Image (cartoon, rainbow, N blue to C red):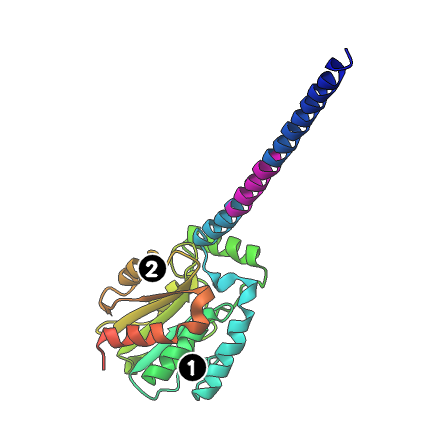
Amino acid sequence: MKKILPIILSFAMLLMLTACGNTDTGSDTVADDTSGAITQEIAGAEEVAENGETQEDMAAETSSDAGEADTQSAQDGAENGQTPGDTESTGTGGVLIAYFSKTGNTETIANMIASLTGGDLFKVETVVPYPDDYDETVDIAKEEQDNDARPELSTHVENMEQYDVIYLGYPNWWGTMPQAMFTFLEEYDFSGKTIIPFCTHGGSALGRSEGDIASLAPDAALLDGLAVRGSSVDSAQGTVEEWLDGLGLE
C-alpha cells in the first residue's frame, strides 16, 4: 500500500500540470485573434478614407486647408511681376490666363502658366462672393448648376480682341466648371481663338467641362486640358511645364 500511494500522487500531479498547460495555450490563441481583428479594422478605416477622397465631386478648391495655396500663389505672382487680383488684363501680348479660384489652388497653377508663357493674368470674380463655409459653397454651387445660373461678374476683360490664346482655369465643381465660368464664356466672342482649359480637382479631373466649353464657344479651337489634384498644386511645376511643351504652341 505504501508503494502504491506515491504512484497515485505522481499521477495526480501529472494531470494538474497538463491542465495548466492547456489553459495557457488557449489564452495565447485568443490574444492573437484579437490583435489580428484590430489590425484589419485599422486597415479598413484607411481604405475608406482614401476612397472618400477619390470620390469627392467638388474639387479641393473649396477645402479650408488650401489656405497655404493662397499664400504661395500671392508670392509666385509677386515674383513673376504679375498681380493675380487685377480686375483687367495688362494688355501686353496675345496670351491670356483667365481663371476662377476660390481658395488659391487654381490661382497657383495660373501663376505657373503665366510665368512660363509670359501671358496676362485675369481673375474671374463674382459680384456676390461664395461663402467661406465649405458646405454652404457646395450647396450654392449645386443649386446654381441645377438652375443653369449665370452669376454676375465683377471683373471684365476690356480688350479681349487682342488675345488669340486663352488659358481657362477653374476648380471642378460638381463635375464641371463653376457657373461663373459659363458667364465668362458667354460674355465674349471667342471665334478664331484657341482655348486651353486647366483645372484643379479632388478626383474627377476635368469632368465634362471640356464639352461645356465647346458648347459655349463653338467657333474656338479647344486644345487638350490639364487637371491637377488640389492637394498637389504646390509641386505641379514640372507637370505644368510638360503639358505646355506638349501643346506645341511655341
Q: What span is colored magenta in the figure?
A: 30-43
Residue 153 x %, y %:
45, 69
Q: Amino acid at mark 1?
A: Glu
Please name which of the two marks, 1 or 2, marks the residue nearer to the observer. 2
Report if residue 32 lies within the magenta region: yes
Which residue occupies 55% across, 70% down? 67
- Which residue corresponds to the image point at 37% horizontal and 63% vertical from the top-left? 182
Query: Which kind of residue does numbered mark 2 sit on?
Result: Ser
> Which residue is drawn at the image coordinates 31% and 87% (left, top)?
93
Q: Which residue is mark 1?
A: 88
**Depth check, front residue: 71 or 241:** 241
Q: CA distance from mark 1 to mark 2?
A: 24 Å
Position in image of residue 162 (x %, y %): 29, 83
| Residue topped by disc 2 | 209
Determine whether 30 is above or below 181 in the image.
above
Q: Position of residue 166 (x, y in %)?
A: 31, 75
The secondary element bearing badge 1 is classed as: loop
Instruction: Name the residue: 43% across, 73% down.
Output: 235
| Mark 2 Cα-neighbour bin, 10 Å: few <14, some 14–19, many ≥20 | many
Q: Earlier in the sequence, mark 1 or mark 2?
A: 1
Can the viewer see residue 21 in this picture?
yes
**Image quarter (top left, top right, bottom left or bottom right) of the N terminus:** top right
Foreground of the two, 9 or 194: 9
Q: Quarter of the image holding residue 28?
A: top right
Q: Residue furthest top?
A: 1
Asked if the stretch drawn in magenta spans residue 25, the answer is no
